[in-house]
Image (cartoon, rainbow, N blue to C red):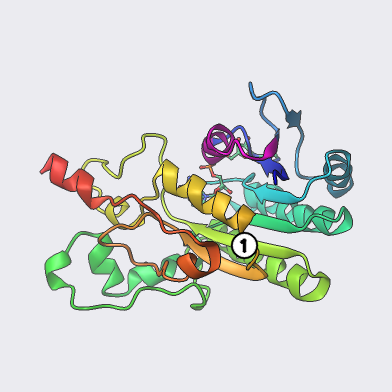
Amino acid sequence: MSKNILVTGSSGLIGGIILKNNSKNNLFGLDVAPSLYPNHEISDISNSKKLENIFLKNNIEVVVHLAGKTSVNGTWNELIGNNFDGTANIFEASKNSGVDKVIFASSNHAVGLFENDNPYKQIISGNYEDVKAYDLIKSNCELRPDSLYGVSKAFGENIGRYYYETFGLKSACLRIGSVRPVDTPIEGNFNRFFSTWCSHKDISGLIEACINSEKIGFNIFYGVSDNKWKIWDISDQQELLNFHPESNAEIFRKQNS
Ligand SMILES: NC(=O)c1ccc[n+]([C@@H]2O[C@H](COP(=O)([O-])OP(=O)(O)OC[C@H]3O[C@@H](n4cnc5c(N)ncnc54)[C@H](O)[C@@H]3O)[C@@H](O)[C@H]2O)c1
């Protein structure tokens, strides 16, 4: 049965991918920026009461929360309203209006400091010859944010856990890798995308699987394609989401070598 889904940050890159690909549900967009999408509300996420009214008016069952400052160099002043207050408002309004589930766009930067350690450091810089067998970074690893932006995403995950354990509001936090406007991992000699790339098909499939899954309580998943050199563990997605990503960055490297 189709669900009423509200997507915040719907005028952005991932919002646009979802609106284009998720046709089974009734989708509503919300963003400070305009959109050509017909069900679109121009609104800031800074006002929890206003969000609550929008959720109630549209009988929203699932919120896909993407809106926010997206730069890893974001300053405290840029992040405080858009990422900290805004995300808290989304959870509060969702609780008050009977939303069943929030899908929160967290980020790999919530755990980015693992990339200072080998073998992850070697892998993301493309020094594969030095890499021995290695453990993938699990979704229940320590939070190790690498920036204030990463801290804002770790905050979002923590508030998600609090609202689930205290109020029963379900949430899936997606530590998204690299979704790019041009849907490839190729950028000059930059090797990191061969580990972190997430194709448009895979991010939209992951979000759709989170919308449909009945097994979500409070969960964290990595949003990454099935890349040969991925560093994050996605083995729990088949069982909990009935989903496995299809793309693999390595195919592009072979085409370009
Ligand atoms: N693209 C990636 O590779 C990637 C990786 C990790 C995490 N993420 C996260 O996924 C989400 C979406 O990323 P994206 O690449 O589509 O970003 P984007 O910058 O293309 O889109 C973000 C959208 O949020 C809107 N927005 C910002 N502040 C707002 C506010 N206060 N109220 C309402 N709307 C607001 C912007 O207008 C924009 O349309 C972000 O939260 C980002 O941090 C993205």
Number of numbered discs present?
A: 1
Q: Which residue is painted at 51% across and 64% down in the image?
A: 221
**128 sits to left or right of 89:** left
Above/below status of 65 relative to 169: above
Residue toward you, 55 or 244: 244
Residue 190 lies within the magenta run: no
Looking at the image, residue 108 sits to the left or right of residue 67; the answer is left
Q: Residue furthest top?
A: 36
Between 32 and 206, the residue placed more toward the observer is: 206
Taking the magenta stretch, the answer to whether it contains residue 23 is: yes
For the C terminus, the quadrant is top left
**Callout 1 crowding tier (Cα within 10 Å): few <14, some 14–19, many ≥20:** many
Q: Amino acid at mark 1?
A: Ala
Say if 90 sits above or below 12 in the image.
below
**Looking at the image, can residue 227 be seen?**
yes
- Residue at image position (23%, 67%) is 122
Residue that numbered label 1 is attached to: 172
